[in-house]
Image (cartoon, rainbow, N blue to C red):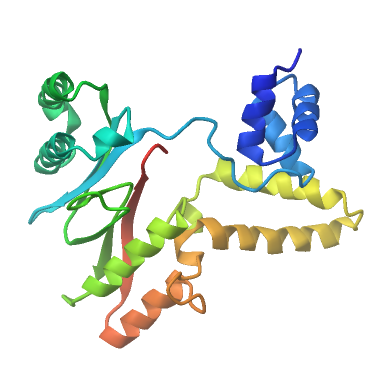
């Protein structure tokens, strides 16, 4: 199968690798861009995380709370100019309120959301799309990054902390939300991380280590070390706390629990980044 210039360009965006390496990778993998990306990773040529091949959608992440819980919503627009428009801000807030009050029962409010968006398209003059939403019940914490308005921005995080007694965790909750916004964890703990992600990473590391020519028992020990490093990067409880890298998030929760005299756990979190 022939390799097109666009395929080479897309793979370069994804991998950060050079043009000739990308061309060879595509040629070796029947022009399958995902297989070519993995081929580059196995040879240590590509960066660890795949970059997007598409330009990010514009729009806003919105967060809203009431006495029952907190909702997070992403609504997309065609241009960044519209995302800064007051009419668009009002639209996003109205949609977030519907999601919040329905506790993210989208089917019960989808007609109203659709009608609201259609009316806004007529006024704003751009295509507008409701992308996704989530809802966390109970006492929660939140943070919006790159704020363009009250609880409106480009990255949003909502989080719930679980304790055995009623204590003030406002500062801790916000700081962990800020950490999640910056560090983009894929899961709360290793057990909740998608097994396909784990196996794929193991396979890539094994292929890289085979190039070293070391014995299999040494490779297995090196694999364990590299996987632990991987978990530190993508699992929230294993990540180094951005405000104090001498602590992991798990250490932070233990310290807060000892200080407050009660165990503190993260029960759930949601992180939305515009266009992801």
Residue ID at (88%, 54%):
212
Please report the residue visible at 60 percent of the width from the left and 48 percent of the height from the top. Answer: 198
Q: Residue furthest top?
A: 1
Camera-side residue: 110 or 131?
A: 131
Q: Examine the rendered structure and indicate whether residue 153 appears above or below residue 223.
A: above
Residue 200 occupies which quadrant of the picture? Answer: top right
Is 66 left or right of 70, judged from the image as shown? left
Where residue 159 appears, as percent x and y from the top left, is 28, 58
Taking the view exactly as shown, the residue that stands out farthest to the front is 81
Q: Quadrant of residue 157?
A: bottom left
The residue at the point 18 percent across, 25 percent down is 124
Residue 185 as seen in the image, left or right of residue 220:
left
Q: Is residue 183 above or below residue 17?
A: below
Asked whether residue 63 appears in the rendered view, the answer is yes
The residue closer to the viewer here, 262 or 142, is: 142
Q: Is residue 134 left or right of residue 237?
A: left
Q: Position of residue 133 (x, y in %)?
A: 26, 39
The quadrant the N terminus occupies is top right
Rendered image quadrant of residue 170: bottom left
Q: Is residue 34 visible?
A: no
Q: Residue at position x 31%, y 77% from top?
A: 263
Question: Can you give x and y, in whole percent of width and height, for residue 122 in the image?
Answer: 14, 18
Q: How many marks?
A: 0
**Quadrant containing the C terminus in the rendered view:** top left
Q: Position of residue 49 (x, y in %)?
A: 59, 46
């Amino acid at each position: 199968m022939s390799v097109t210039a666009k395929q080479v360009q897309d793979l370069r965006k994804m991998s950060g690798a050079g043009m000739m390496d990308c061309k060879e990778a595509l040629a070796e993998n029947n022009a399958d861009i995902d297989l070519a990306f993995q081929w580059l990773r196995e040879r240590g040529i590509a960066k660890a995380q795949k970059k997007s091949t598409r330009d990010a959608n514009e729009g806003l992440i919105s967060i809203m709370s009431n006495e029952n819980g907190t909702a997070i919503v992403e609504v997309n627009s065609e241009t960044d100019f519209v995302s800064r428009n007051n009419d668009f801000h009002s639209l996003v807030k109205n949609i977030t309120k519907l999601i919040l009050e329905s506790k993210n029962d989208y089917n019960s409010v989808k007609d109203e959301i659709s009608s609201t968006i259609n009316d806004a398209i007529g006024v704003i003059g751009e295509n507008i799309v409701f992308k996704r939403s989530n809802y966390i019940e109970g006492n929660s914490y939140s943070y919006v990054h790159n704020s363009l308005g009250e609880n409106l921005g480009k990255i949003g995080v909502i989080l719930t902390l679980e304790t055995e007694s009623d204590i003030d965790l406002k500062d801790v909750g916000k700081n962990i939300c800020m950490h999640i916004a910056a560090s983009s964890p894929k899961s709360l703990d290793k057990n909740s991380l998608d097994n396909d992600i784990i196996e794929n990473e193991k396979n890539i590391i094994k292929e890289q280590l085979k190039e070293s020519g070391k014995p299999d028992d040494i490779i297995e020990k090196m694999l364990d070390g590299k996987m632990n490093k991987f978990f530190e990067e993508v699992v929230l409880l294993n990540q180094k706390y951005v405000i104090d890298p001498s602590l992991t998030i798990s250490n932070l929760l233990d310290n807060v629990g000892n200080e407050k005299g009660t165990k503190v756990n993260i029960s759930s979190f949601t992180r939305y980044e515009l266009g992801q």
